[in-house]
Structure formats: C-alpha cells, structure tokens
Image (spheres, rainbow, N blue to C red):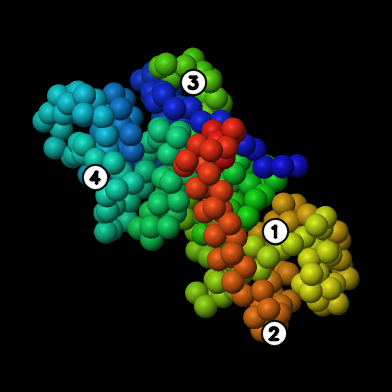
Amino acid sequence: MPLPRISLSVTQNFLKESVINTVFDANIKIPGNITVIDIGAGTGNITAWLAKHAKNQILAYELDQNLTRELFTRFTGTNRVAILNKNFLQTDPPEHDFMVVANIPFMYTTSIIKQLTEDPHFIEGYIVVQKEAAFRFGGHQVKHPAGLQSILMSVDFTFEILHTFTSRDFTPAPNVSSVLLHIKRKVPLLRYNQREDFEDFVSYLFTHSVPDIRKAPGVGRFLARSIDLGRITLMHKKPSELTLDDYYYLFSLCDRELLDKIMGSMETTVEQGESVDKVYRTRNASDWRDMV
C-alpha cells in the first residue's frame, strides 16, 4: 500500500476554545517542571489552556504581527507566558528539556517535526497535524504501513493518535482531516556507533527490495543464508511491512563486510529527496502540492 500524499491546507485553522478544553483535558498531561512551547499560537486558545495547566514557562510563537498584538493584549499580566513574534523554524529552541502543545500550520508540518525530533531537548509533543502526516511519521505505531522515515523515527520516538477532530472543531473549517498526535521520546536500543550503519541498512532495503526483502541485491541473499528458519517469512515481506523489531533483528545478522558494501545508502536517499524537494519549491511539477 503506497504512503499517503498530503494535500496542504494553506490557511491556518484555529481550534475552538470549547474543543480544546474538552479534548486536551481528556488527553494531555503536562509534567510540573518543564517549558512548554505553543507553535503558531494564533488567537491564543491553546496558550490560554496551557496557562491554566502548565506550571512552568510557556513560549508562544506567532509570526503574524496582528495576531501577535492580540496575544500580547490577551496575556498581559500572565508572567509565565512569553509571546514571541518569531518564526519557530528560524529560532533556537531552549537549551533545556521542553515539550510542545500546538496546532501547527499544516504547510510547515514536515519542517517543524523534523526540527523537533532532531533536537535532543525535545521530550514530548501533543501536536495537531493532518491525519496523513500522522501516518507518515507514525507508520506501524499508528496502524499504517511504514515508510523509511517512520521506521527511523521510531528508533527514538513513540507515536500515538489520541483524537480525531471534525472540521467543525476549527475556525475556519479545514478541508483535510486532522488528529491530535502524541510524540514521546524513548530510550533507543541502538548504541551510538550503530546508528549510521542501521540507517544505511534500512534505507538500502527500502530502495532496493523489489518486490520484497529477498530481492535486495546482495543483502537479500546474505540475510536468507543467516536468518533463523522460524523467521524466514520476513524475507517475503515488503520493507513497509516490517516492524522496527524486525529491522533490529535483520540488522543483527549483518557483518561488517556487508555493512561496508551498503555504506552511504542513507546519504544517497537524502540527496534524492532533496532533488524532489527542489521541484516542490519551484512549483514546476503539476502536483507540487502533494509532494510532502
């Protein structure tokens, strides 16, 4: 099953205050001593909820100057709330542990999630995203076929869809389906010096296994000779059907010689992705809105 294409919702759609109170009260727990960030604070409804439930500092980022002025007025005298008229993607997050509770602009979802998950101080997030984006990042964890990105992200993070919103929950109503996605950092099972080899291994299987793992040049034959007969069915699966534990097991079978042969696979995949991104940025492709 192919990964979903994401049709961007360009207009910022704000969650209604009543919906935030109901859904967030039921699903979100905020530790007592952690900085909380609201990205794309907009009218301030999520920031207001955080002011009631978070005991530490709240950083509310909003790029629109008119909305920022409204936020300053709304939260005057609320000492724990700092209103920042800045682009979150162009600023340095706190140099200490923080979490995110936000309804982010959907058109910047990939960039925001990438920045967060690459920041060692990002601990947890409750983020409103497009449903297809949740599938892309969460993969098997949200009961959807896995992609290369979801497998690699699952090394460090757990993903869970906590709630599915309706279009009536927003103002204005969006033309896409939205969910509350919970992202939480976990302790990775890989040692630091294994990370690059694992990324190359997973990337190689995703780009060379047609139609299944058996057919990956060199690697498929090696794994078939080394695999436990009780797990031989893994060789007949597509990369998107393998779980993170499956990848860990297959990776454990690899020797140094094999890993050296596929070294750099992840870098090649990233370069190919960047060439696609250039088409997206220049709008040369007729379906550029789906390239996310």
Asked whether residue 32 appears in the rendered view, the answer is: no
Q: Residues within 10 Å of mark 1 (few under 14, many from 20)?
A: some
- Residue 221 in the image, given as x and y percentages of width and height: 84, 73
User: Residue 10 appears at what percent x and percent y?
Assistant: 44, 27
Q: Which mark is residue 257?
A: 2
Q: Which residue is mark 3?
A: 174
Residue 2: percent from left, percent from top = 72, 42
Mark 1 belongs to which amino acid?
Phe
Front one among 109 and 99 = 109
Residue 225 placement: quadrant? bottom right
Quarter where residue 22 is shown = top left
Which residue does the image show at 62% across and 36% down from the upper left?
A: 5
Q: Residue at x 39, y 26 (%)?
A: 12
Q: Inspect the image, locate mark 3, and give the three-letter code of the amino acid beneath it.
A: Pro
> Which tag, 3 or 1, sits closer to the chain's start?
3
Residue at the disc numbered 4: 56
Location of the N terminus by quadrant is top right
